Image (tube, rainbow, N blue to C red):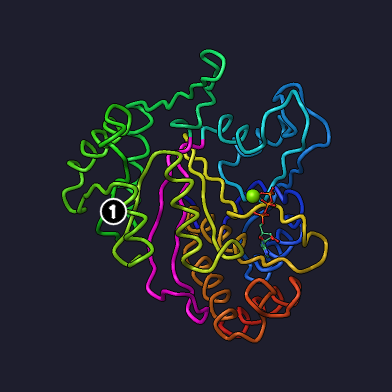
Amino acid sequence: FCSSTTPITATLFPGDGIGPEIAESVKKVFTTAGVPINWEEHYVSTEIDPRTQSFLTWESLESVRRNKVGLKGPMATPIGKGHRSLNLTLRKELNLYANVRPCYSLPGYKTRYDDVNLITIRENTEGEYSGLEHQVVRGVVESLKIITRQASLRVAEYAFHYAKTHGRERVSAIHKANIMQKTDGLFLKCCREVAEKYPEITYEEVVIDNCCMMLVKNPALFDVLVMPNLYGDIISDLCAGLVGGLGLTPSCNIGEDGVALAEAVHGSAPDIAGKNLANPTALLLSGVMMLRHLKMNEQAEQIHSAIINTIAEGKYRTADLGGSSTTTDFTKAIYTMYDEMS
Ligand code: ATP
Ligand code: MG
């Protein structure tokens, strides 16, 4: 929606734990690459904002709503009563209805498979995460799994649109409709309806248990996977594990009104925070997803190649990938690689 030289304002949540260190890495690489982005930084507050009932301030949410694009580091929800979880607040307040997680083998970083190239798309607003749990009588509790036609159509539409615009050939809907006949049944019905509008995309339905087996045996069988909330939570982590783990996997949350909030999959890693040990790759690749969303494709591809080439070269790697580089040395290797390439 803009030419790649007009500066864009994007919200940046460095987050907690290793967040500020890896956010610094993104800022550094983007600056070296001359990416025309002005970061509007917002931190998680130390006090609850009564307007949001959360440690996220109203101003920070407004910033994402206004800019419609942002990058988020990991956030650790402070323990205590009377406030909402940070991630739940973001999802609800910004209507982030789909979580998109690409998983592809990184050349040069050896895992069990070298041909993984799939996208998981997770419904992010309902299902088992509706927060409707109660005790029926002593010793018996109930949790309500909510599936609506509106949210199912919305995420299915996003998945097919994504497949079409990203040159993907197949969408697999993951379900357990043989048991959850009403809920997963409705989810599948919505996927089928949308599939009819995309005759050029192959549509299939895969039962979740079989999907898990196929993923660990031959992940190359899959292309785009779309699924309800809880299945998406589990399958997307499984897929991240296939390609090398938490330090590497990016994601992007898609909201209504075109909002996109990219974020690393991992948590705040308190065990290594402040030690200059974190792997910034996941947040950097999330930043690349953000650039693609902004149609800054050239910069996105160049930064992506610099990251991939640095890891493939193997001279500079962080400890989680078996290397001994610090966050800052690895970051420097990436922007040096970028300069050499251009
Ligand atoms: P949170 O409560 O914030 O989710 P967590 O304790 O669940 O945190 P993660 O932060 O997700 O855990 O991390 C799990 C493990 O993976 C930790 O040992 C952490 O050090 C490691 N880890 C996570 N992210 C990275 C990263 N970017 N670089 C290196 N190691 C990481
Ligand atoms: Mg965690």
Part of the protein shown in magenta: 96-124
Q: Does the magenta stretch include residue 71?
A: no
Quarter-of-image position of residue 341? bottom right
Q: Quadrant of the C terminus?
A: bottom right
Q: Does the magenta stretch include residue 103?
A: yes
**Extreme residue toward the top, this view:** 137
- x then y, percent, for residue 200: 18, 53
- x then y, percent, for residue 84: 68, 29
Q: What element carries label 1?
A: helix
- x then y, percent, for residue 260: 52, 45
Q: Residue at 49% x, 38% y: name it.
A: 255
Residue 330 is left or right of residue 305, and the answer is right
Q: Which amino acid does label 1 sit on?
A: Lys
Tell which of 338 and 81 is nearer to you.
Answer: 81
Residue 188's place in the image compared with 282, above or below, is above
Q: Residue at 48% x, 58% y: name it.
A: 292
Tell which of 202 and 319 is nearer to you.
Answer: 319
- x then y, percent, for residue 118: 38, 61
Tell which of 224 and 303 is nearer to you.
Answer: 224
Residue 263's place in the image compared with 124, above or below, is below
Residue 313's place in the image compared with 7, above or below, is below
